[in-house]
């Protein structure tokens, strides 16, 4: 408990009132700790509100360490195992928030609010209130110091002309995605100020962009979505793709973007359930008088068939299958099952859902998220080098890492 009479002294100061910061404040506050959350924006939890298309995909039934990307893939295990998706679901149930699994027949485990993301934020606010947490919004932080004198160690945070002090400081300021919503590199700068290593960051869960003829093609197909497999040498995702005015989006593209390096090609399988070569050669036997376009229109959107045809096999526009040499059918099949595309870039932090990289997990205890070299300093959520796949995994990391820190901060 707070033993210092100074009203600006807290047991725990949390920098950032997002998913991780609020959950950490709740956990620490519920232990009787006197907690202050300092949030720079005009309201807390803005990303929660915009998440999941306004319905917050708040966790995933299949949360497990393999769904996270980090330079140290083992780091997330401890926190995820001690605060699981079931713990968060219990909290959601306690607040009687209605939710559902998206596409249960697909079984991807994504849980969304039936109504609105506002329900999740209201739940966190109510829990903060019950735990006696103080939340200051519009708190511009001008300086953070760790002060050690002969009988005490404390953190000092200057914000809006006030000076706050605490025993523990939790860094929960998130990543760089969506700068329009106030994302900055504050967390990384502060980590560096405390001599913590910060790994290179890049945008993840973000659409690909293209130039030249492929860009022209995606523009024409903009709005068309279909199930596909999108992969590179490191990862493969079987989910929907969506052609856009700038390139390629949809869950499969967003997922693969987290594994993509600039300059690399990606491979798109437009017929994930069919071996296109077998299908075309068999069709040639069974329906020799049918034109290629008609066969392809049965398995792919017409507009896509038209654009592929214009780009890759213009000579066979209205050719009967019997008149197309097997070698050409095999080449066409390889475009359908293994279309090699070279993205120019991604849309970057402007539209990215997450930031990959960040505070090096080697600097932190995987049990408590406390910095090994700076006792009392905790780093949680997206600012740390742990990034989830699409589907509620990022919030689950925010809840779990926050809980780990909140249990001890
Ligand atoms: C459009 C979009 C949709 C998403 N949908 C989902 C989804 O459905 N499911 C899912 O799992 N994940 C989703 N994510 C990812 C998820 O939102 C993040 O992983 C998660 O919010 C990270 O939590 P955090 O608390 O670490 O960071 P944030 O939620 O970003 O919170 C950080 C907070 O710190 C504040 N802050 C920043 N700098 C300072 C400073 N200097 N001083 C004080 N405060 C500061 C910010 O204003 C913010 O409130 C989505 C992301 C986006 C952008």
Image (cartoon, rainbow, N blue to C red):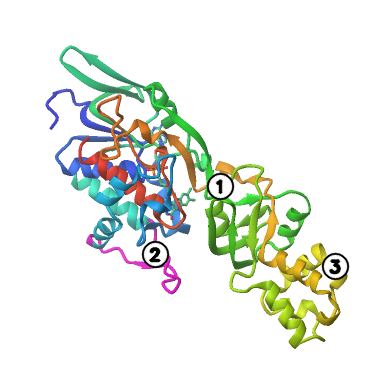
Q: Main secondary structure of the magenta part?
A: loop
> Label 1 belongs to which residue?
351
> Label 2 belongs to which residue?
109
Q: Residue at x 41, y 33 (%)?
A: 359
Membership of 215 in magenta stretch:
no
Instruction: Give the side of residue 191 with respect to residue 31, left or right.
Output: right
Are the residues flagged by discs 3 and 2 in contact, CB closer than 8 Å? no
**3D distance between C-alphas at marks 2 and 1:** 24 Å
Q: Residue at x 71, y 82 (%)?
A: 282
**Residue 399 in the image, given as x and y percentages of width and height:** 31, 48
Q: Which residues are magenta?
A: 94-117
Quarter of the figure that contains the C terminus: top left
Instruction: Give the side of residue 304 with respect to residue 161, left or right.
Output: right
First along the sequence among labels 2 and 1: 2
Camera-nearest label, 1 or 3: 3
> Label 3 belongs to which residue?
314
* Ligand 1: quadrant of the figure: top left
Camera-nearest label, 3 or 2: 3
Secondary structure state at the residue bearing disc 1: loop
**3D distance between C-alphas at marks 1 and 3:** 36 Å
Quick one: 341 or 154, which is closer to the camera?
Answer: 341
Instruction: Give the side of residue 361 with respect to residue 203, left or right.
Output: left
Quarter of the figure that contains the N terminus: top left
Q: Residue at x 15, y 42 (%)?
A: 31
Quick one: 186 or 358, which is closer to the camera?
Answer: 358
């Amino acid at each position: 408990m707070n033993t210092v009479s100074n009203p600006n002294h807290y047991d725990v100061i949390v920098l950032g009132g997002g998913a991780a910061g609020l959950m950490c404040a709740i956990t620490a506050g519920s232990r009787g700790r006197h907690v202050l959350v300092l949030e720079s924006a005009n309201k807390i939890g803005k990303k929660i509100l915009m998440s999941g298309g306004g319905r917050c995909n708040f966790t995933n039934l299949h949360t497990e360490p393999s769904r996270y990307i980090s330079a140290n893939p083992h780091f997330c295990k401890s926190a995820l195992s001690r605060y699981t998706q079931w713990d968060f679901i219990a909290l959601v149930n306690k607040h009687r928030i209605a939710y559902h699994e998206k596409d249960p027949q697909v079984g991807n485990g994504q849980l969304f609010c039936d109504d609105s993301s506002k329900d999740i934020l209201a739940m966190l606010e109510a829990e903060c209130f019950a735990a006696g947490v103080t939340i200051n919004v519009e708190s511009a932080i001008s300086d953070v110091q760790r002060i050690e004198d002969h009988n005490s160690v404390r953190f000092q945070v200057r914000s809006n002309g006030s000076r706050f002090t605490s025993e523990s400081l939790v860094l929960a300021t998130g990543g760089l995605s969506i700068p329009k919503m106030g994302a900055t590199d504050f967390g990384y700068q502060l980590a560096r100020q405390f001599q913590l290593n910060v790994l290179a960051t890049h945008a993840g869960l973000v659409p690909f962009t293209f130039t030249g003829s492929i860009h022209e093609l995606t523009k024409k197909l903009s709005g068309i979505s279909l199930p596909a497999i999108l992969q590179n040498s490191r990862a493969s995702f079987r989910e929907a793709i969506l052609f856009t005015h700038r390139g390629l989006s949809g869950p499969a593209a967003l997922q693969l973007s987290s594994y993509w390096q600039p300059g690399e090609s990606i491979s798109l399988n437009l017929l994930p359930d069919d071996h296109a070569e077998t299908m075309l050669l068999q069709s040639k036997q069974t329906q020799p008088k049918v034109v290629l376009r008609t066969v392809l229109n049965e398995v792919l959107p017409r507009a896509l068939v038209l654009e592929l045809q214009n780009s890759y096999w213009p000579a066979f526009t209205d050719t009967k299958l019997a008149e197309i040499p097997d070698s050409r059918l095999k080449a066409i099949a390889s475009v359908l099952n293994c279309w090699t595309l070279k993205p120019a870039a991604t849309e970057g932090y402007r539209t990215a859902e997450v930031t990959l990289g960040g505070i090096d997990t080697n600097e932190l205890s995987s049990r408590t998220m406390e910095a090994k070299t700076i006792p009392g300093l905790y780093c949680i959520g997206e600012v740390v080098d742990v990034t989830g796949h699409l589907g509620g995994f990022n919030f689950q990391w925010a809840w779990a890492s926050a809980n780990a820190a909140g249990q001890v901060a």
